[in-house]
C-alpha cells in the first residue's frame, strides 16, 4: 500500500515536471544547473527520507547540495559517493570504504570499486533518491557508469529518482570511435562515441529509452514518450532541467570535476589525451597539468621535458621521478573534434613500438586498457598500421551518424546542429 501511494505521488510529480522536459531554444542568459531550481523539486522531497548521490561538484551556488537540502527542511538520510569520493579528494581508481560525513554525520556508501550499485539494505530506509554529479561529457569518465548502476538500483528497489541535470562542458560536438559492447567495462558501458554531446540527464533518458539498462531495470523503466501517453505507465526517474542551457553553450565548471582535471582547458583536452592512460607514456599525472602534458623517457630529448612526481592528486603517478620528454599542449586551441595527432606522433617517435601500449597478461584484445578506452581494438590496429588521422576519422563516420540519430530522440536542449 505504501509503495502504491508513493508511486501514485511520484506519477503526479512526473506530470508536473514533464513540462520542463521539452527542448529549449538558445538563450544568452546565465546557465543554471538543475540543482539550482529548488522550487521545482524540493516540494516532492519534503517529508521523505532522501538518499543523495553526490560529490564535491554538487553545488547550489557556493553551498553543497546536501547542505542546501538540509537547510530547506529535507531529511537527507544517506549519501552515495562515486570515484574520488564524496568530497572529491581520492585519487583515480582508489577504492574507498563506507564512511560517515564529518560535517553532517550522514552515512556515506561508496559506489566505486567492488561495489557499484546500491543494495536493498542500503535503500531500505530511503524513500526517494537524488542524483547530482557534474559530468565532463566523455564516455570513459566513470560517472556515466555510476549513473547507470544507480538508476538500476533505484528501479530494482522501487525508489523514485530525481536526476538534477548539469551542463556538459564538452556538449558542443559528437566525435570519436563508438564502443563495441564486447569491450564493455566501467570506463565504457554503452555503444556511444568518446564524445557523445549529451548532458547527464539526456544520457539517462537515452539508456532507459534504448533499453540499455540491466534486464530487470529494462522491464520497469519506460520510454519517455510512452510515459507521457499512458497514465498507467510508472515513471521511475525525472530529469530536472538546467535553465538557459543549449548545446552551443561553453559552460565553465565552477569546481574541478576530479583531482586530475583541475582546469577547463584540461577538461577540453581530456577526450583526446586520456588515451595515453592505455600506453606506457605519462599522461601528465603528477604534474601541474595532467592531460595537458604527456611523454616518456625514451622519446627524443629535444621535446618538452617534465618529471612526474607524487602529488595529492596523484600519489604514485606513472613514470614517477623519471625525466620524460613529450608535449605540453596547455595552449592548444579548443576544437569541435577529438584530436589524434599527438597520439599518432607519439607512436611514430616511440623507439620500441611493441611496448607503446600497456599489455595485459592475457594478451586478449578485450583486456587491453587502451582498447577499453577506445571502445574496440580497431584504433590500436589503425595506429600500428600507420593510418593517417583522416583515414581513422573516416572509419568512425557510419557509426557516428547512426548514433546521432539515436541521440536526437533524447535531447532536452537545442542542439548545435
Image (cartoon, rainbow, N blue to C red):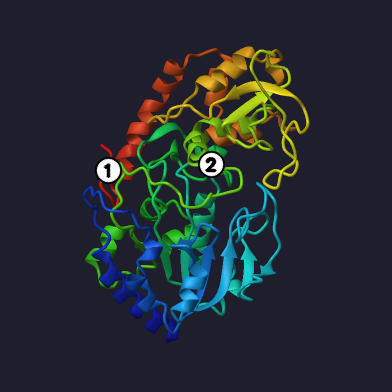
CB under 8 Å between callouts 2 and 1?
Answer: no
What x and y, as percent, mark residue 334?
Answer: 42, 31
Figure check: 252 above or below 114:
above
Under circle 2, the secondary element is loop
Residue at which label 1 appears = 415
Q: Residue furthest right?
A: 321
Q: CA distance from mark 2 to mark 1?
A: 23 Å
- In this orientation, which residue lies closer to the viewer: 154 or 287? 287
What x and y, as percent, mark residue 360?
Answer: 71, 32
First in sequence: mark 2 vs mark 1: 2
Figure check: 33 above or below 66:
above
Residue shown at the point (66%, 13%) measured from the top left: 302
Figure check: 17 above or below 382:
below
Q: Residues within 10 Å of mark 2 (few under 14, many from 20)?
A: many
What x and y, as percent, mark residue 357?
Answer: 66, 25
Q: How many marks?
A: 2
Q: Look at the image and tell me whether residue 172 can be seen.
A: yes
Residue shown at the point (30%, 59%) measured from the top left: 224
- In this orientation, which residue lies closer to the viewer: 90 or 373? 90
- Checking the image for residue 140, the label placed there is 2
Q: Look at the image and tell me whether residue 158 can be seen.
A: no
Please tell me in which quadrant of the rendered image residue 408 appears: top left
Q: From the viewer's perspective, is 256 left or right of 162?
A: right
Please tell me in which quadrant of the rendered image residue 89 appears: bottom right
Q: From the viewer's perspective, is 305 left or right of 250?
A: right
What x and y, as percent, mark residue 90?
Answer: 67, 53
Residue shown at the point (47%, 72%) measured from the top left: 68
Under circle 1, the secondary element is loop
Q: Quadrant of the N terminus?
A: bottom left
Q: Nearer the viewer, mark 2 or mark 1?
A: 1
Amino acid at each position: 500500500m505504501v509503495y502504491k501511494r508513493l508511486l501514485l505521488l511520484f506519477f503526479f510529480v512526473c506530470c508536473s515536471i514533464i513540462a520542463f522536459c521539452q527542448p529549449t531554444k538558445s538563450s544568452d542568459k546565465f546557465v543554471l544547473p538543475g540543482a539550482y531550481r529548488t522550487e521545482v523539486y524540493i516540494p516532492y522531497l519534503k517529508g521523505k527520507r532522501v538518499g543523495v548521490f553526490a560529490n564535491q561538484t554538487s553545488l547550489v551556488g557556493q553551498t553543497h547540495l546536501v547542505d542546501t537540502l538540509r537547510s530547506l527542511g529535507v531529511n537527507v538520510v544517506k549519501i552515495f559517493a562515486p570515484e574520488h569520493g564524496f568530497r572529491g579528494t581520492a585519487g583515480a581508481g582508489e577504492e574507498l570504504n563506507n564512511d560517515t560525513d564529518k560535517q553532517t554525520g550522514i552515512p556515506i556508501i561508496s559506489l566505486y570499486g567492488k561495489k557499484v550499485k546500491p543494495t536493498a539494505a542500503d535503500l531500505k530506509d530511503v524513500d526517494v533518491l537524488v542524483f547530482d554529479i557534474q559530468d565532463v561529457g566523455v564516455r570513459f569518465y566513470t560517472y556515466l557508469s555510476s549513473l547507470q548502476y544507480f538508476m538500476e538500483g533505484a528501479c530494482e528497489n522501487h525508489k523514485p529518482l530525481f536526476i538534477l541535470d548539469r551542463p556538459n562542458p564538452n556538449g558542443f560536438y559528437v566525435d570519436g570511435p563508438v564502443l563495441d559492447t564486447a569491450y564493455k567495462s566501467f570506463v565504457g558501458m554503452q555503444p556511444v562515441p568518446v564524445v557523445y554531446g549529451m548532458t547527464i540527464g539526456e544520457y539517462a533518458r537515452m539508456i532507459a529509452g534504448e533499453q540499455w539498462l540491466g534486464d530487470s531495470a529494462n522491464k520497469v523503466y519506460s520510454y519517455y514518450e510512452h510515459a507521457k501517453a499512458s497514465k498507467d505507465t510508472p515513471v521511475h526517474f525525472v530529469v530536472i532541467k538546467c535553465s538557459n542551457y543549449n548545446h552551443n553553450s561553453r559552460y565553465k565548471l565552477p569546481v574541478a570535476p576530479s583531482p586530475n582535471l583541475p582546469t577547463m582547458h584540461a577538461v577540453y583536452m581530456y577526450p583526446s589525451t586520456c588515451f595515453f592512460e592505455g600506453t606506457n607514456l605519462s599522461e601528465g599525472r603528477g604534474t601541474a597539468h595532467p592531460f595537458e602534458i604527456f611523454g616518456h623517457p625514451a622519446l627524443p630529448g629535444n621535446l618538452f621535458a617534465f618529471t612526474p612526481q607524487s602529488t595529492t592528486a596523484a600519489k604514485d603517478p606513472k613514470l614517477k621521478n623519471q625525466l620524460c620528454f613529450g608535449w605540453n599542449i596547455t595552449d592548444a586551441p579548443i576544437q569541435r573534434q577529438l584530436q589524434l595527432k599527438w597520439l599518432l606522433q607519439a607512436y611514430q617517435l616511440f623507439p620500441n613500438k611493441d611496448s607503446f601500449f600497456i599489455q595485459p597478461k592475457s594478451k586478449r584484445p578485450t583486456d587491453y586498457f587502451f582498447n577499453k578506452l577506445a571502445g574496440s581494438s580497431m584504433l590500436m590496429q589503425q595506429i600500428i598500421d600507420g593510418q593517417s588521422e583522416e583515414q581513422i576519422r573516416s572509419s568512425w563516420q557510419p557509426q557516428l551518424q547512426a548514433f546521432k540519430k539515436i541521440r536526437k530522440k533524447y535531447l532536452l536542449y537545442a542542439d548545435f546542429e
